[in-house]
């Protein structure tokens, strides 16, 4: 009897312990199934971003973001940089970035900087742009409480994209600015870098195309060579506009479409860039084209333990 009571008590305890969590589970909402992450997964695109491609091939990304209030951040990303320069154009991708602030269809020389500085923005190359091996990016952070300022910002970007004057007299003035920038970068660090780069970028185009370029070329290039780089590589299908800020997203999208809709390519599309990089005698030939974001990738070579890199 005693034994039975013990068994009954045990059964009751087991039932109770089983039932309490069950009751608790019934009270809770069912937990959503979480799929395990795998490194091959594509990062989901932010659903709040409005994106599209204009008929001319330019891509845009627009998103409302109310913090900070009354600010809009604009970016124009151009898929070109120093790797696209011909031998006699070394330094001209960077020179072009400087010339964006020195005269265009809607902003005579000097006016672009003075207009945006009057809105409280800091302006000029290096503050508002950078040139790298594979991309050139322009940046404007503007107040959004006066819509005409944002409109002007997009007009300036459209000028960068297709309406630069590249006036020879203005180019001559800017040569000295860029030479000073090159000179300012000299020093112990640059001497170490000059030793490292041929090893780090062994036999690759990256080793031969530092964005600062060659001072002799910057001093003497004919303006037509800068124009040729601009017309060939500043094409709408190699560009993206990003506009994020405290502004109605539909309005921002409409303004982007209006500002860039009429942009046209001014020269035939360049052939895909070919980069051959060889590490320890094992070479790999690859190419990039305008449809994918080019990036440095290290892959194990089939001819040994060395690595090949493609860009
Ligand atoms: Zn510069």
Image: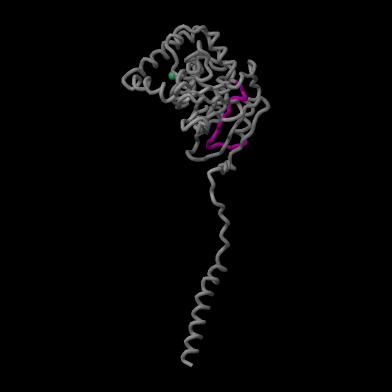
Question: In this orientation, which residue lies closer to the viewer: 63 or 226?
Answer: 226
Q: Splitting the image into 4 quarters, where does residue 186 fall?
A: top left
In this picture the colour scheme is: one colour
Residue at 65% x, 16% y is 268
Residue 7 appears in the picture as rendered: yes
Q: Splitting the image into 4 quarters, where does residue 280 fall?
A: top left
- Relative height, residue 304 to residue 40 (above, below): above
Question: In this orientation, which residue lies closer to the viewer: 159 or 148?
Answer: 159
Q: Position of residue 44 (x, y in %)?
A: 57, 43
Q: In this view, which residue lies farthest toward the left?
A: 188
Q: In this view, which residue lies farthest toward the bottom?
A: 1
Could you tell me how many numbered marks the image carries?
Answer: 0
Q: Position of residue 18 (x, y in %)?
A: 52, 74
Question: In this orientation, which residue lies closer to the viewer: 3 or 190?
Answer: 3
Q: Position of residue 246 (x, y in %)?
A: 53, 37
- Relative height, residue 45 to residue 309 (above, below): below
Residue 4 within the magenta-colored segment of the rendering: no
Residue 246 within the magenta-colored segment of the rendering: yes
Q: Position of residue 232 (x, y in %)?
A: 59, 16
Question: What range of the chain is rendered magenta?
Answer: 235-250
Q: Is residue 222 left or right of residue 51?
A: left
Residue at 44% x, 24% y is 201
Residue 110 appears in the picture as rendered: no
Question: In this orientation, which residue lies closer to the viewer: 65 or 162?
Answer: 162
Q: Quadrant of ligand 1?
A: top left
Q: Is residue 226 left or right of residue 291?
A: left
Q: In this view, which residue lies farthest toward the front?
A: 303
């Amino acid at each position: 009897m005693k034994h039975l009571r013990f068994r009954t008590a045990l059964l009751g305890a087991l039932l109770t312990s089983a039932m309490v969590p069950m009751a608790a589970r019934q009270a809770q909402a069912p937990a959503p199934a979480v799929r395990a992450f795998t490194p091959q997964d594509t990062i989901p695109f932010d659903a709040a971003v409005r994106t599209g491609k204009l008929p001319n091939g330019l891509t845009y990304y627009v998103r409302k973001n109310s913090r900070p209030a009354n600010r809009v951040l604009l970016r124009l990303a151009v898929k070109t940089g120093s790797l696209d320069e011909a031998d006699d154009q070394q330094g001209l991708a960077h020179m072009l970035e400087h010339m964006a602030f020195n005269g265009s269809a809607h902003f005579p020389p000097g006016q672009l900087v003075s207009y945006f500085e009057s809105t409280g923005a800091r302006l000029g190359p290096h503050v508002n742009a950078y040139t790298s091996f594979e991309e050139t990016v322009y940046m404007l952070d503007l107040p959004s409480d006066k819509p005409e300022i944002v409109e002007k910002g997009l007009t300036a970007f459209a000028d960068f994209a297709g309406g630069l004057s590249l006036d020879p007299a203005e180019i001559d003035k800017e040569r000295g600015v860029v030479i000073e920038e090159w000179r300012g970068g000299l020093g112990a660090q640059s001497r170490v870098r000059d030793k490292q780069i041929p090893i780090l970028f062994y036999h690759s185009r990256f080793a031969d195309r530092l964005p600062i370029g060659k001072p002799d070329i910057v001093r003497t290039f004919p303006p037509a060579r800068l124009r040729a780089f601009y017309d060939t590589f500043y094409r709408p299908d190699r560009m993206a506009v990003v506009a994020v800020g405290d502004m109605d997203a539909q309005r921002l999208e409409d303004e982007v479409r209006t500002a860039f809709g009429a942009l046209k390519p001014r020269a035939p599309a360049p052939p895909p860039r070919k980069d051959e990089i060889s590490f320890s005698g094992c070479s790999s030939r690859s190419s990039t084209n305008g449809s994918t974001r080019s990036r440095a990738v290290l892959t194990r070579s089939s001819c040994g333990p060395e690595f090949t890199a493609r860009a």
